[in-house]
Amino acid sequence: MLKEMQVLATGKLRDTALNILRAQVILHDWQKGGKRPENEFYALLQEADALYSIGNVKIDESFLARAPKLKVIAQASVGYDNIDIAACQKFGVRVGNTPGVLVDAVADLAYALLIDTARGIVRGHEHVKSGAWGARKGVGFGVDLAGKIVGIIGMGAIGAALAKRAQASKMQIVYHNTRVRTDEAEMGAQYVALEELLKISDFIVVSVPLTQETTGLIGTAEFAKMKPTARFINTSRGKVVDTMALYEALRTGEIAAAALDVVDPEPLPSNHPLLTLSNITITPHIGTSTVETRDQMATLAANNIIAALRGDAMPAEVV
Ligand code: DGY
């Protein structure tokens, strides 16, 4: 009976998800009571048929062993690097995520960060705020996007949405991906080897999921291949990049600038060396943080739960 099923939510729920879930199942909103003892969480997990996750919990065998009734985990994110999928399969737990609905929001932020590396928007704002409007030297010149090469590492839905935006700015697009896209001509994009992409690109955007293969994908050797004028943007996962290698590349002028929405570690401590640099912009992992997108992610995650508890096909099931 669906009405008797228990759903444990590990993070704050948007009203869209609350309404769907409350109407059909018993919902335990873990965040609601503020900080509560861990054993209370595990008591709820013990009885949970479904888990609504926002990616803040590491889900592995030992976690699943404490959730004997669990049938589904619905995570409100496209990335699911916090979830051991093989362990879920072993325990017979289905996993859902929220691809598609967040593509434009993340691509918009990646594009905004790319433009910031070219034009120093945040720097300009800080300059004005410090009362130095007239002293233009403090801001300096930016560079045009038109005619420049953007290299997109990871040409999935978000990479492709970014390519469209780059096309509008008359950029030349190259990409590296696990497969050559059949629609590359339509995107005006050309597949190249990673090494070639690193060498020729004026802007390098990372848009890959975090996997064993992509962990530490960009490090000292990769930064050394980039142009000294290269601008580096990451909106995927912080662990794809070796943070201290990036710091060194920016500090020594091996590359010109970077803009990141994701970092390793997260949250980034306010005394982190990256924050001492003047050629970096960092936002606090807000790629999907728009009202509309978060509502759609929450709705999709809630619908994933209801479908799985009914034994139906989930709107977005991982593998
Ligand atoms: C995602 O969907 O994976 C975003 O990074 C939000 O966590």
Image (cartoon, rainbow, N blue to C red):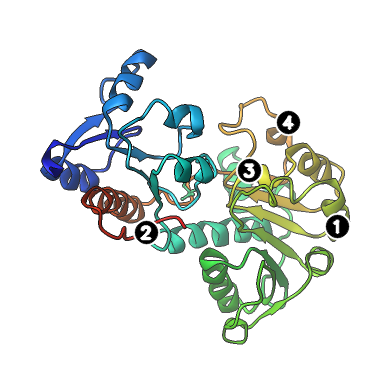
Q: Is mark 3 in CB contact (under 8 Å) with mark 2? A: no
Q: Residue at x 35, y 32 (%)?
A: 10
Provide residue 22's location: percent of width, then percent of height. 15, 40
- The residue beneath circle 2 is 316
Picture layout, residue 248 above or below residue 117: above
Q: Is residue 25 left or right of residue 153?
A: left
Q: Residue at x 66, y 42 (%)?
A: 239
Question: Which badge, 4 or 2, comes first in the chain's sequence?
Answer: 4
Q: Residues under labels 4 and 2: Cα distance?
A: 39 Å
From this viewpoint, is residue 285 visible? no
Q: Residues under labels 3 and 1: Cα distance?
A: 22 Å
- The residue beneath circle 4 is 273
Q: Amino acid at mark 1?
A: Pro
Q: Residue at x 61, y 27 (%)?
A: 270
> Dot 1: what SS?
loop
Provide residue 153's location: percent of width, then percent of height. 68, 63
Question: Which badge, 4 or 3, comes first in the chain's sequence?
Answer: 3
From this viewpoint, is residue 108 visible? yes
> Dot 4: what SS?
helix
Q: Nearer the viewer, residue 237 or 163?
A: 237
Q: Residues under labels 1 and 4: Cα distance?
A: 20 Å
- The residue beneath circle 1 is 228
> Dot 2: what SS?
loop
Instruction: State which mark lies toward you, 2 or 1.
Output: 2
Q: Is mark 1 in CB contact (under 8 Å) with mark 4? A: no
Determine the image quadrant of residue 149. Answer: bottom right
Determine the image quadrant of residue 25. Answer: top left
Q: Amino acid at mark 3?
A: Gly
Q: Amino acid at mark 2?
A: Ala
Instruction: State which mark lies toward you, 4 or 3.
Output: 3
Question: Which badge, 3 or 1, comes first in the chain's sequence?
Answer: 1
Q: Residues under labels 4 and 3: Cα distance?
A: 15 Å
